[in-house]
Image (tube, rainbow, N blue to C red):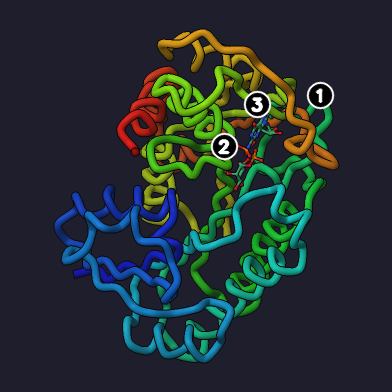
Amino acid sequence: MTRVLITGITGFAGSHLADYLLEKTDLKIYGIKRWRSRTENIEHLMGKIEFYECDLRDASSVRDLIEVVRPDMIFHLAAQSFVPTSWSAPAESLETNIMGELNLFEAVKRTGIDPLIQIAGSSEEYGAVEEDEIPIKETTPLRPLSPYAVSKVGQDMLAYQYFKSYGMRIVRTRGFNHTGPRRPPVFVCSDFAKQIADIERGVKHPIVEVGNLKAVRDFTDVRDMVRGYWLALARGTPGEVYNICSGVGRRIGDVLSTLISIGNVEVDIEVDKRKLRPSDVPRLIGDSTKLKTATGWQPTIPFEETLENILNFWRESN
Ligand code: GDD
């Protein structure tokens, strides 16, 4: 049995990755959680996965974990992942994301095992892309526009350096926006969908509060995204970096219109200034040719279906 460790398994992408990997019969899955982690995303995984208490910011805690689990593959998804939080708590974002990864690498190195390791980077790393750099390739310069994006560039470069310096078998992915059921409501599609579901059930005034509707993002269903993580690690080349994206740019205002058209209520739209960011990346549209060529990955779930799934998720949540 191949021993697979998922960090961030209690989160959105981590729990979907666990669902996907559990369909494979030759894997034994391990997950980590902190004593105060929320567990609603993993209740259905209890009994199928071995959980360990570990805080990635604590080097000794990570070393103990790696010595016990001795994984053959690691998917490193644990992170502070909400861009606005990185402005209100920049040090926390940098420490969680960069030091957490450093502790993981050092623990692996000291234990003397040689696992395949996936590092979940982000399209936010590209930041201020020029018009003629779209669609974004892996070779496009990194010009981060938020502390979160800087933390992801740090993770990306640290992974590159540990591959180069120590020959660790690390594959980096740069995931563009991904969404789906279980997405926390601070992120845009879930934020809008939850507001519409609340209006439908009469617990909110018929006003959807929004931020910057002009931004353009490239969305992939989370279930396609986690399959990309798996394929990148299982079939990709250590030391390489792969974009994971649909290649389609969507204006956030259009995403809102689609969600409103799926909903059953008339709503007004109001800009909430608190949702506007000091700098918002205007346009992120990616090119995933490298991943497709290396692994055969293709996105399969149409975006409209993803949005319907998200709205239904919030309709069914109390
Ligand atoms: N959250 C939110 N809420 N965003 C809004 C709103 C709103 O009401 N209105 C407009 N937006 C805009 C944001 O300004 C941003 O341009 C876009 O919608 C997407 O926002 P988020 O869903 O918060 O995601 P993100 O693009 O900042 O970051 C996500 O994608 C990255 C990959 O590109 C996160 O998942 C990151 O962790 C991930 O790395």
Q: Within 8 Å: ligand 1 and the Cβ of disc 3?
A: yes
Q: Is residue 101 above or below residue 279?
A: below
Q: Measuring 56% from the left and 56% from the top, which residue is drawn there?
A: 172
Q: Measuring 40% from the left and 26% from the top, which residue is drawn there?
A: 311
* x, y percent for residue 235: 39, 51
Dot 2 or dot 3, earlier in sequence: 2
Please rate how many residues cluster around mark 2, counting C-alpha atoms within 10 Å: few if below 14, some from 14 to 19, many from 20.
many
Quarter of the figure with the N terminus: bottom left
Please rate how many residues cluster around mark 3, counting C-alpha atoms within 10 Å: few if below 14, some from 14 to 19, many from 20.
some
Query: Residue 177 has which mark?
Result: 2
* x, y percent for residue 218: 59, 28
Looking at the rendered image, the disc whose residue lies closer to the viewer, 1 or 3, is 3
Q: Is residue 79 above or below residue 135?
A: below
Please rate how many residues cluster around mark 1, counting C-alpha atoms within 10 Å: few if below 14, some from 14 to 19, many from 20.
few
Measured in 3D between alpha carbons, the distance from the residue under mark 2 to the one under mark 3, in whole angstroms, is 20 Å
Dot 1 or dot 3, earlier in sequence: 1
- At label 3, the amino acid type is Glu
Q: Is residue 28 left or right of residue 117?
A: left
Q: Is residue 306 left or right of residue 138?
A: left
Seen from the viewer's position, the closer of residues 74 and 124 is 124
Looking at the rendered image, the disc whose residue lies closer to the viewer, 2 or 3, is 3
Measured in 3D between alpha carbons, the distance from the residue under mark 1 to the one under mark 2, in whole angstroms, is 19 Å
Q: Is residue 207 above or below residue 53?
A: above
* x, y percent for residue 237: 48, 56
- At label 1, the amino acid type is Glu
Which element type, helix, strand or loop, lies under badge 1? helix
**What residue is disc 3 on?**
209
- At label 2, the amino acid type is Asn
**What residue is disc 1 on?**
131
Q: Within 8 Å: ligand 1 and the Cβ of disc 2?
A: yes
